[in-house]
Amino acid sequence: MSKTIQIKVPAGKKAEWQKIDGKTVLVMVDEKDNRPVTERIKTFEDACNELGENHPMVSAYNSLVTRANGGQSLAEWMGKDVVAFLKLRIITETLNEGWHPKFTEDEYRYYPWFYLYTKDQYDNFTKESKRSCVCRVNYDANADGGLIFSNAVNASSHSNPDNGVCFVFSNRDLARYAGKQFIDIWTDFIFKPNDNNKQ
């Protein structure tokens, strides 16, 4: 004979029967958010929460953050570019939702593309276009590693990018979203800090 009971389910949870140690028990589990990934993942913290603290990339990042808490920030200890690299690994993993490149001839892989502009070009942009820009270099700024090699010489008059394999996305829209939504993290990863603090 079956019985009927009523229980209050907390927001964001659902009741689900699961087999644990040979017994079937009713447990509360997180309710899956079925919104598109670009609506769920707006911050680095969102990406960490989506993967969960036990994911190897999140676990590695968290252990380094904890290790750096001796009065020195993770960025001071490892450098902003290394911290950005660790964050972008997590963001890329989350946005790709389980997709990983196979590097076959017929496979397309996408990555954010960044342009370097001169001051004159920048000054002629609309206010909306300026919001997409992250910085302007004075002379010989470069960085390489992971996804991008970016090189700007002679006040950005000459530049060239090349791509690697660390931060590739399954489609063009995801790559564009990742580049725009997480522009500050990309800036820390791609651009070498100016030692004399000039912008």
Image (spheres, helix red, strand yellow):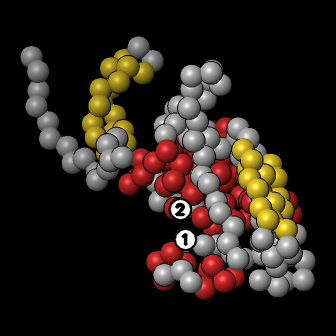
Amino acid carrying label 2: it is: Lys
Q: Which residue is mark 1?
A: 132
SS at circle 1 = loop
Picture coordinates of residue 135 (x, y %)? 69, 75
State the residue in front, 195 or 171.
171
* Residue in the picture at 62% in, 54% down: 113
121, 129: nearer the viewer: 121
Q: Nearer the viewer, mark 2 or mark 1?
A: 1
Q: Which quadrant holds residue 73?
A: bottom right
Which residue does the numbered mark 2 point to in the structure image? 180
The type of residue carrying mark 1 is Ser
First of labels 2, 1 by sequence position: 1
Secondary structure at numbered mark 2: helix
Residue 183 placement (x, y as % from top left)? 60, 64
In this image, 140 relative to 118: left or right?
right
**Quadrant of res 66:** bottom right
Q: Are marks 2 and 1 in contact (CB under 8 Å)?
A: yes
Task: Say which quarter of the image contains residue 108.
Answer: top right
Label 1 packing within 10 angstroms: few (<14), some (14-19), many (20+):
few
Quadrant where the C terminus is found in the figure: bottom right
Marks 2 and 1, Cα distance to the nearest angstrom?
Answer: 7 Å
